[in-house]
Image: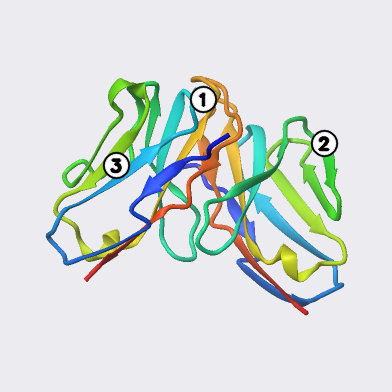
Amino acid sequence: EAGVAQSPRYKIIEKRQSVAFWCNPISGHATLYWYQQILGQGPKLLIQFQNNGVVDDSQLPKDRFSAERLKGVDSTLKIQPAKLEDSAVYLCASSLNGRGVTGELFFGEGSRLTVL
Amino acid sequence: TQLLEQSPQFLSIQEGENLTVYCNSSSVFSSLQWYRQEPGEGPVLLVTVVTGGEVKKLKRLTFQFGDARKDSSLHITAAQPGDTGLYLCAGALDSNYQLIWGAGTKLIIKP
């Protein structure tokens, strides 16, 4: 079974530029998560989708971050414009369980963003 | 704001020693998960504990969920270099199943 796929693995941009990350979850997984992980810290949830609907985006900086999950399968996360403090690893995860149940999260390898 | 505190933040020990890391909160969790993350990779689930007082063993790793379902511990016996990594706990809130993450314990096992 294929795991969670993310791209690109690495991205270096200058502040005020834009960047987009792509995630393809495990087939059949209803729930998709985007996390931001700053070096030395635990993952911080940015947005959670249930199929193609948003369950939780309370910690998403909506003035610069956006995410979509068209057709309830793959997802993109965009940052525009980027700030220095956005330098982090962006992790995508998926889980089989629906809303109201917390099961195992399967993570991709992450996309490491460096903002100069 | 619900917090999940992990301690210690960093631990470096010799191969063969035993260690315990902790995960504590004032919130009640319906379940608690432990993940291990290696450099350049995403976290991988080690175990999920659900019942207060539950103890689960995974080879040399022993996981315990507190009786009140507010805390958990991970004990490693005879640590090996392959145990090196970032250990993360994540609790599902009893109220809405929202997953709360700790900041992690970075563990280094020296040969």
Specify the subunit that label 1 lies on.
Answer: B
Image quarter (top left, top right, bottom left or bottom right) of the C terminus of chain B: bottom right
The crowding category of the residue bearing disc 3, from other C-alpha atoms within 10 Å (few below 14, some 14 to 19, many at least 20), is some
- Look at the numbered discs 1 and 3 and tell me whether their residues touch, using CB distance below 8 Å: no
Looking at the picture, tell me which residue is in the foreground, A108 or B97: A108
Q: Nearer the viewer, residue B32 or B69?
A: B32
Image location (x, y in percent) of residue A2: 53, 37
- Residue A60 badge: 3
Q: Few, some or many C-alpha atoms within 10 Å of disc 1 (few <14, some 14-19, many ≥20)?
A: few
N-terminal-most mark, 1 or 2:
2
| Quadrant of the snapshot with the N terminus of chain B | top left
Q: Residue at x 71, y 36 (%)?
A: B69
What crowding class fits label 2: few (fewer than 14 Cα within 10 Å), some (14-19), or many (20 or more)? some
- Find numbered disc 1 in the image and state the secondary structure of the residue it sits on: loop
Q: Are marks 1 and 2 on the same chain?
A: yes
Q: Is residue A103 above or below residue A18?
A: above
| Residue ID at (87%, 66%) | B78
Asked if badges 3 and 2 are on one and the same chain, I answer no
Give the number of the disc on residue B96: 1
Q: Looking at the image, is A8 positioned above or below residue A73?
A: below
B66, above or below A36, in the image: above
Q: Name the side, left or right, on which A77 lies relative to B18.
A: left
Instruction: Give the side of residue A23 with respect to residue A13, left or right.
Output: right
Q: CA distance from mark 1 to mark 3?
A: 19 Å
Q: Amino acid at mark 1?
A: Asn
Give percent across and percent down for residue B27. Answer: 59, 38
In the displayed orientation, state which residue is furthest to the front.
A1
Residue sitting at x 44%, y 43%: A5
Disc 3 and disc 2: Cα gap in Å? 35 Å
- Where does residue A29 sit, x and y in percent of width and height? 49, 26
Residue at 51% x, 20% y: name it: A98
